[in-house]
Image (spheres, rainbow, N blue to C red):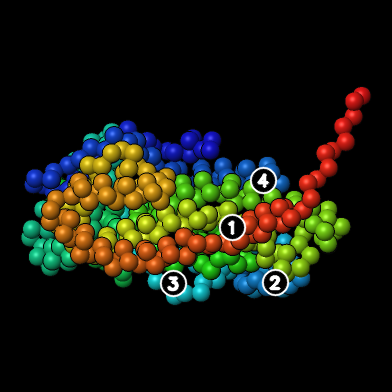
């Protein structure tokens, strides 16, 4: 993507602490990078400017459609913007896309600080991906009881011997673990690790909706990012997936707008749809590119994963990740980065089950069954003619069979 200079720190490896006992720690031979957010944003904006994108300040209020034109109304203004297609990228505020079912996600909640500290115990070449130890709660029975039931972990990025990012994270919960609770747990951890904060550079309050229903699709308004359900339902990651899908969506839009149209408004020159039916067909084609059936199946599997994680207590979570990080790199890397196809995810699931202890298998069976049934229900429509594409293809093939063979094109011998 040409964006590697937007990573401000790269740790060559990462580590997971499962407990202070038998399970111990696991080193992950995979680099971990921290994005320089202002730089990434500046880089992307510069690319837009260089490509001639026009920016207009304002907050979107609503959208209406008619005769193949979409009109976006701005808040606190008489101004509106019209176009052939509207792409909603308003994140988790989901401003314009519509849902036909209740949106009921799980939530990743985290409270973190970037702090200047007297000292900390973390190796500078290792990112601490997850620390599920709970020794720091031995003298805090109330927090310990909460953590046993609804576990949170420490995520730490050491920048130098005296500067560190520390975050107490609830992987997924419904309802979310609240911020005062997360803060209390982080304080207890820092006290136990002997970390004395000298100053706080940045505080982070993180609440990411995960899973939940997808927006109605196709629909006239297009969607990308949080608004279009693109957050990984089992991990909360989205940035890389979104950067990956953006060119696919942009290409699909360009393809639709550059198709010659019989009755186009500007005699076919602008590619604008002439009717609502034509505009709806164009949007549907872009939705198909954004959410091909394979991605829908993958998401159903990830949502099943989230459903299992929602139900695990601390001990079960540790057993789960012990099995997860014992899988082949192909499987656990592919799961986290959303690169496994549906059949590969099935193999991943079976491998995870085979790698688990007997107790963990029993837990997965009992706690995973409702989610498994939910996944099968979600998958059922994708097994047939989900987008009506095959129907269209069959009709086109049948029409082609009934047409006389086309005459060969004339050839010039000169
Ligand atoms: C603290 C925190 C840490 C995170 N860490 C990670 C991580 O390490 N890795 C990862 O992959 N993900 C991470 N995430 C998740 C990730 O940041 C989000 O999923 C992602 O930002 C969503 O991207 P988006 O572009 O869809 O929405 P956003 O980034 O939320 O952008 C939406 C934009 O739309 C604008 N907007 C909203 N309403 C309107 C309106 N009415 N009119 C005009 N504009 C509007 C907003 O101002 C905003 O600029 C983190 C999230 C948080 C909160």
- Give the label on residue 237, or none: none
* First along the sequence among labels 4 and 2: 4
Distance from disc 3 to disc 4, alpha carbons, whole Å, reads: 35 Å
The quarter of the picture where residue 311 lies is bottom left
Dot in front, 3 or 4:
3
Q: Which residue is mark 1?
A: 390
Q: Please tell me how crowded label 1 is: few (under 14), some (14-19), or many (20+) other residues with Cα within 10 Å.
A: few
Distance from disc 2 to disc 3, alpha carbons, whole Å, reads: 24 Å
Q: Please tell me how crowded label 4 is: few (under 14), some (14-19), or many (20+) other residues with Cα within 10 Å.
A: few
The quarter of the picture where residue 235 lies is bottom left
Dot in front, 4 or 2:
2
Q: Secondary structure at mark 2?
A: strand
Q: Is residue 195 visible?
A: no
Q: Which residue is mark 4?
A: 49
Pick whichever, 414 or 338, lies toward us. 414
Q: Please tell me how crowded label 2 is: few (under 14), some (14-19), or many (20+) other residues with Cα within 10 Å.
A: some
* First along the sequence among labels 3 and 4: 4
* First along the sequence among labels 2 and 1: 2
Q: Secondary structure at mark 1?
A: helix
* First along the sequence among labels 1 and 4: 4
Residue 124 drawn above or below residue 388:
above
Is the CB of the residue bearing disc 3 within 8 angstroms of ligand 1?
Answer: no
Pick whichever, 84 or 408, lies toward us. 408
Q: Residue 21: where, in percent of width, then height? A: 8, 47
Tag 3 near tag 1, CB within 8 Å: no
- Give the label on residue 65, or none: 2
Tag 3 near tag 4, CB within 8 Å: no
């Amino acid at each position: 993507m040409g964006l590697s200079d937007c990573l401000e720190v790269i740790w060559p490896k990462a580590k997971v602490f499962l407990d202070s006992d038998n399970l111990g720690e696991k080193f992950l031979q995979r680099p971990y990078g921290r994005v320089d957010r202002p730089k990434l944003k500046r880089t992307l904006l510069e690319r837009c400017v260089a490509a001639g994108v026009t920016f207009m300040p304002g907050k979107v209020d609503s959208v209406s459609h008619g005769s193949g034109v979409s009109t976006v109304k701005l808040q606190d203004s008489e101004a509106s913007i019209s176009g052939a297609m509207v792409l909603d990228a308003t994140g988790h505020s989901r401003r314009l896309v519509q849902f036909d079912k209740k949106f009921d996600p799980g939530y990743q909640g985290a409270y973190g600080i970037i702090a200047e500290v007297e000292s900390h115990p973390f190796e500078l070449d290792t990112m601490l991906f997850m620390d599920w130890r709970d020794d720091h709660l031995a003298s805090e029975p109330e927090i310990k009881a909460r953590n046993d039931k609804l576990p949170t972990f420490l995520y730490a990025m050491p920048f130098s011997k005296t500067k560190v990012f520390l975050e107490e994270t609830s992987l997924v919960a419904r309802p979310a673990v609240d911020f005062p609770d997360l803060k209390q747990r982080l304080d207890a951890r820092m006290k136990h690790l002997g970390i004395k904060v000298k100053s706080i550079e940045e505080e982070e309050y993180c609440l990411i909706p995960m899973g939940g229903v997808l927006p109605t699709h196709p629909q006239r308004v297009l969607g990308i990012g949080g608004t279009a359900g693109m957050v990984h339902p089992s991990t909360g990651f989205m940035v890389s997936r979104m950067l990956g899908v953006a060119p696919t969506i942009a290409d699909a839009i360009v393809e639709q707008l550059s198709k010659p149209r019989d009755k186009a408004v500007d005699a076919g020159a602008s590619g604008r749809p002439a009717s609502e039916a034509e505009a709806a067909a164009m949007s549907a084609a872009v939705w198909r590119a954004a959410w091909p059936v394979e991605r829908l199946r993958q998401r159903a599997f990830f949502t099943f994963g989230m459903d299992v994680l929602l139900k695990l207590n601390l001990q079960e979570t540790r057993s789960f990740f012990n099995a997860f990080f014992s899988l082949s790199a192909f499987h656990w890397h592919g799961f986290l980065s959303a690169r496994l196809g549906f059949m590969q995810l099935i193999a991943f699931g079976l491998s995870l089950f085979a790698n688990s202890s007997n107790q963990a298998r029993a837990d997965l069976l009992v706690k995973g069954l409702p989610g498994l049934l939910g996944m099968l229900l979600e998958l059922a429509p994708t097994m047939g003619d989900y987008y009506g594409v095959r129907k269209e293809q069959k009709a086109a093939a049948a029409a082609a069979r009934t047409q006389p063979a086309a005459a060969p094109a004339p050839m010039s011998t000169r």
